Image (tube, grey):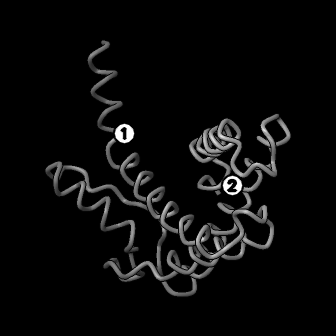
């Protein structure tokens, strides 16, 4: 649930909607507060749909969608872990497996959202672009989860 309505997700939605409003993309929504709200709602419904699909299918297929840090490893190893776990999930047995539920959820939710998007962005090309952005967003989130605790610890330690 925090992946959908937690502070990082809500902030990312505000940034995304703000950027879209600034650039007036798509133009059907306009450049005022109601356009911002439409863009924000569009992202939120897409994220909620994707997260619900991934959690439900993951539960059935034995995939854990959570990201687990690789603490204590060298930087390069941790960076590879961030990338790897964008496309893999932990299995019930504790190993890793392809994140099939994530693939279906990110792809399915982006094509499904074509039904409620503005006409200019409700096509296959835009859905494919959103799928790529979805995986890039997942990778960015993994990197944040992996490295932010270390950065935060060092920054606050310096200030003491």
Give the residue drawn at x 69%, y 55%. 43
The x, y position of residue 159, in whole percent, is 31, 13
Residue situated in front as seen by the camera: 123 or 93:
123
The x, y position of residue 12, in whole percent, is 59, 44
The x, y position of residue 70, in whole percent, is 26, 56
Q: Quadrant of the N terminus?
A: bottom right
Distance Cα–Cα, label 2 vs label 1: 24 Å
The extreme top residue here reads 160
The first of marks 2 and 1 along the sequence is 2
Label 1 neighbour load within 10 Å: few <14, some 14-19, many 20+: few
Residue situated in front as seen by the camera: 22 or 36:
22
Circle 2: element type: helix
Q: Which residue is the site of mark 2?
A: 43
The extreme bottom residue here reads 61
Number of on-image labels: 2
Asked if residue 101 is positioned above or below residue 15 in the image, the reply reads below
Which quadrant would residue 94 be assigned to in this image? bottom left
The x, y position of residue 65, in whole percent, is 48, 69
Q: Which of marks 2 and 1 is in front?
A: 2
Give the residue drawn at x 79%, y 73%. 115
Asked if residue 66 is positioned above or below residue 55 in the image, the reply reads above
Give the residue drawn at x 81%, y 42%. 30
Residue situated in front as seen by the camera: 5 or 71:
5
Contact check, label 2 and label 1, Cβ < 8 Å = no
Give the residue drawn at x 81%, y 48%. 29
Q: Which residue is the site of mark 1?
A: 148
Q: In which quarter of the image is the C terminus?
A: top left
Circle 1: element type: helix
């Amino acid at each position: 649930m925090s992946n959908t309505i937690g502070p990082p997700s809500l902030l990312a939605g505000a940034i995304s909607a703000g950027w879209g409003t600034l650039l007036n993309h798509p133009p059907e929504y306009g450049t005022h507060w109601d356009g911002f709200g439409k863009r924000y709602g569009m992202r939120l419904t897409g994220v909620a749909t994707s997260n619900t699909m991934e959690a439900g299918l993951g539960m059935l297929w034995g995939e854990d969608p959570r990201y687990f840090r690789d603490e204590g490893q060298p930087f390069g190893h941790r960076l590879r872990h961030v990338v790897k776990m964008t496309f893999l999930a932990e299995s019930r047995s504790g190993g890793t497996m392809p994140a099939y539920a994530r693939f279906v959820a990110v792809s399915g939710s982006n094509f499904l959202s074509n039904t409620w998007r503005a006409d200019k962005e409700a096509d296959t090309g835009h859905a494919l672009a959103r799928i790529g952005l979805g995986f890039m967003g997942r990778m960015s989130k993994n990197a944040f989860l992996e490295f932010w605790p270390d950065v935060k610890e060092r920054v606050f330690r310096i200030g003491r």
